[in-house]
Image (spheres, helix red, strand yellow):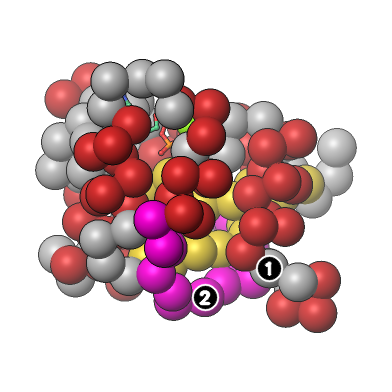
Amino acid sequence: MANNITFTMIKPDAVKNNYIGGILAMINEAGFKIKAMKYTQLTKADAEGFYEVHKERPFFGELVNFMSSGPIVAAILEKDNAVADFRKLIGATNPAEAEEGTIRKKYATSLGENAVHGSDSDENAAIEANFHFAMTERF
Ligand code: ATP
Ligand code: MG
C-alpha cells in the first residue's frame, strides 16, 4: 500500500532525557514524513484506554502510571510499509535486545521505559491516530 501510516509516541522517559530532537532526526532520516504532531500529556484514563489490550498483564498499572507521568510527543508518520518499517526502526521492546542503529538501542532506558511507541498493525495505527488527531490536524 502506498504511503500508509503508523502512529508513534515519544514516551515520557525520552522527553525528560531531552531526546525529542535525536529521535525525530532518526525518524526523518529513515524516510518517514510527519503527517501530524503534538506535544501533550496522557491522562491516566487516556493511558488505560490506549493500552487496554494489556489490562490483564501484571505490568499494566506501572505502564499506565509511566505513560501518564509526563508529556509525550504524539505523531502520525507516513511512508510505504509504515507499520513494519517503523517497528524495525524502533527495535525490540526490551532495549537490551534491540539491534544497533535502532531508536530503542540508542535512547531507551529499560523494558518499561523504552523511549517510543510504534503501532503494531495498520488497523491499530488508524485507531491510535484517530485517538489523538482530527482530520484537520493532518497534512
Ligand atoms: P509499544 O506498544 O509501546 O510500542 P511494544 O509493542 O514493543 O511497545 P507491547 O507488548 O505492546 O510492546 O507492550 C507495551 C509496553 O508495555 C512496552 O512498550 C513496555 O513499555 C511495556 N511492557 C511490555 N512488557 C513489559 C514487561 N514484561 N514489564 C514491564 N513493562 C512491559
Ligand atoms: Mg505494542
Q: Nearer the viewer, residue 73 or 78?
A: 73
Which of the numbered marks, if any, corresponds to residue 88?
none
1 and 2 marks in contact (CB < 8 Å): yes
Pointer 2 residue: 38
Pointer 1 residue: 133
Q: Position of residue 44 (x, y in %)?
A: 39, 56
Q: Secondary structure at mark 2?
A: strand
Ligand 1 resides in the quarter of the picture at: top left
Upstream in the sequence, badge 1 or badge 2? 2
Q: Secondary structure at mark 1?
A: loop
Q: Residue at x 85, y 37 (%)?
A: 1
In the rendered image, is residue 95 in sight? no
Start-end of magenta stretch? 29-44
Q: Residue at x 53, y 27 (%)?
A: 53
80, above or below 52, in the image: below
Cβ of mark 1 under 8 A from ligand 1: no
Q: Residue at x 85, y 45 (%)?
A: 2
Type of amino acid at the residue the image marks with label 1:
Phe
53, above or below 23, in the image: above
Q: CA distance from mark 1 to mark 2?
A: 9 Å
Cβ of mark 2 under 8 A from ligand 1: no
Q: Nearer the viewer, residue 28 or 95?
A: 95
Q: Residue at x 33, y 58 (%)?
A: 68
Type of amino acid at the residue the image marks with label 2:
Lys
The crowding category of the residue bearing disc 2, from other C-alpha atoms within 10 Å (few below 14, some 14 to 19, many at least 20), is some
**Residue 39 within the segment the image draws in magenta:** yes
The image quadrant where one finds the C terminus is: bottom right
